[in-house]
Image (cartoon, grey):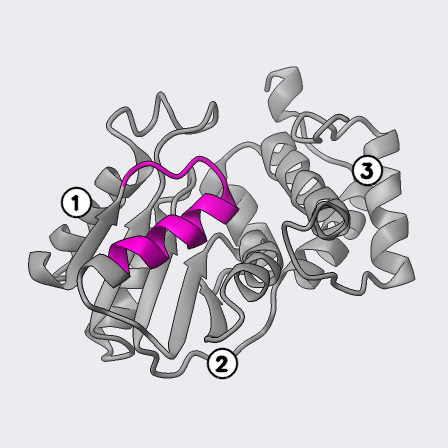
Amino acid sequence: MSDDQRAITEDQWRQAKLIWDYHQMHHVPRPADVAIGLGSHDLGVAAYSAELYRAGFFPHLVFTGGNSPTTAQVFPRGEAVHFREHAIGLGVPDDAILLEPNATNTGQNIALSREVLAASGIHPASVLLVSKPYMERRSFATARKLWPDVEILCASEPLEFDDYLKSIGDEKLVLDMLVGDLQRVIEYPKLGFALEQEVPDGVHAAYEGLIRDGFTSRLITS
């Protein structure tokens, strides 16, 4: 196992699990006017979006995302394009999917998806955001800031933390992402990018502990 894929310690697992649980909004999926599948390295977003569509939770689905350093090699034609193809392969009709292939951050995911929907004459009162499990809170805070007049619900593939670690296959990458997303939850409201979210003391302590242990590759720097 390489240094970047080394096994994490029990204490690091415990800290990461606290942050993992905090990132999830624990919304119960219910019908919405549209869903937006947020692009990432995790193809499970497309699969779970397809599952929710087939279950009748929404009639329209936007996949949004260009590329990032994490996804360029995995999805060379862009996150949204690959997500769309995967969802079609899982039974979602082509005409139910709208494509937003340019966003490079969560704010753009929301803003550009809103534009794509409006261009198709769709002005939803409720939006279901489908994301990686640990991206729920940040996407919720961002959407509530940028689209305050719609009801925002969050959903992600229902995986336990250990199962998600195994599905990605790189423990350090997942912990780096957990830490990076929490930093954005904390810092982005100060920059006007998102609504402030209360961070419990124990979660904040776990975050600081993982930073001290070097899980820092996804941190933003000023």
Q: Residue furthest top?
A: 2
Say what amino acid the circle numbered 3 marks: Leu
Q: Which mark is residue 10?
A: none
Residue that mark 2 sits on: 28
Say what amino acid the circle numbered 2 marks: Val
Alpha-carbon neighbours of circle 1 within 10 Å: few (<14), some, or many (≥20)?
A: some
In the image, 196 versus 182, the foreground residue is: 196
User: Residue at point 63% right, 21% down?
Assistant: 4
> Residue 209, relative to residue 160: is it above or below?
above
Residue that mark 3 sits on: 210
Which residues fall within the magenta stretch?
101-117
Secondary structure category for the residue under label 1:
helix
Q: What is the x, y in percent for residue 8?
A: 72, 35
What separation in Å lies between label 1 and label 2 (alpha carbons)? 27 Å
Residue that mark 1 sits on: 85
Query: Does residue 126 appear left or right of residue 176 in this picture?
Result: left
